[in-house]
Image (spheres, grey):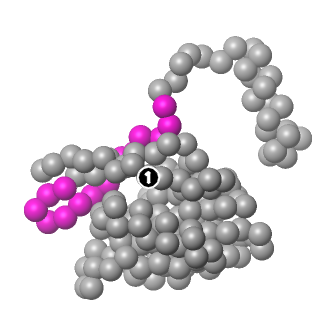
């Protein structure tokens, strides 16, 4: 077995959701889930088919993000992994909906941070072991940091 890392390039003003599912129906169900979440959302998604034709299946409502999801899925090339790039929406707005899609087995991450996917490659194929999401913490927040965090959440209207 060989361990590799795949750096994910996240387009400007986007977030990425990386997960694993189990059936070709994933593409249509994720599309519907995302499209009905907000009229403003822009997204592209790709799914690595693990049997049959073993194609990268894709869809979305933004061609740039669809192409980017396809390339990222091909770079990762791990069975039943899906990649979603979001613009004009945040993962917090869609994550529980995605988790409730029948085919979805797990979510590895939802982030706008620099991202590396840790992949194991065997003679059979590839699988995602985990992810490196962002950077190592520098310390523990201070009272001023807590105040800034609380203000940010209210500015973004996630808290009142």
Residue 121 placement, left or right of 115:
left
Residue 124 placement, left or right of 7:
left
* Mark 1 crowdedness (10 Å alpha carbons): few <14, some 14-19, many ≥20: some
Identified at 23% across, 60% down, the residue is 126
Depicted 154 relative to depicted 99: above or below: above
Determine if the magenta segment contains residue 19.
Answer: no
Residue 4: image location, x then y, percent: 25, 47
Depicted 136 relative to depicted 45: above or below: above
Depicted 116 relative to depicted 17: above or below: above
Residue 104: image location, x then y, percent: 46, 67
- The quarter of the picture where residue 148 lies is top right
Identify the magenta region: 121-135
Q: Examine the rendering and report whether any part of residue 52 can be seen.
A: yes
* SS assignment for the magenta stretch, majority: strand
- The quarter of the picture where residue 153 lies is top right
Residue under label 1: 8
Residue 144: image location, x then y, percent: 77, 16
Identified at 33% across, 60% down, the residue is 76
Depicted 120 relative to depicted 20: above or below: above
Foreground pick, 107 / 86:
86
Residue 105: image location, x then y, percent: 42, 63
Which element carries disc 1, helix, strand or loop?
Answer: strand
Q: Examine the rendering and report whether any part of residue 102 can be seen.
A: no
In the picture, the quarter occupied by the C terminus is top right
Identified at 80% across, 22% down, the residue is 147
Foreground pick, 104 / 86:
86
């Amino acid at each position: 077995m060989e361990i590799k890392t795949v750096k994910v390039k996240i387009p400007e003003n986007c977030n990425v959701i990386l997960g694993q599912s189990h059936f070709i129906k994933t593409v249509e169900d994720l599309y519907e889930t995302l499209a009905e979440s907000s009229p403003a959302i822009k997204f592209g998604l790709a799914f690595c088919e693990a049997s049959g034709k073993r194609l990268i299946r894709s869809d979305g409502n933004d061609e740039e993000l669809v192409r980017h999801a396809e390339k990222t899925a091909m770079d990762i090339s791990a069975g039943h992994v899906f990649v979603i790039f979001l613009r004009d929406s945040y993962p917090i707005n869609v994550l529980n909906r995605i988790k409730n899609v029948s085919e979805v087995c797990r979510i590895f991450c939802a982030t706008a941070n620099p991202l590396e996917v840790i992949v194991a490659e065997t003679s059979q194929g590839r699988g995602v072991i985990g992810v490196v999401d962002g950077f190592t913490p520098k310390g523990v927040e201070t009272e001023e940091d807590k105040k800034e965090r609380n203000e940010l959440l209210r500015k973004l209207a996630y808290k009142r």
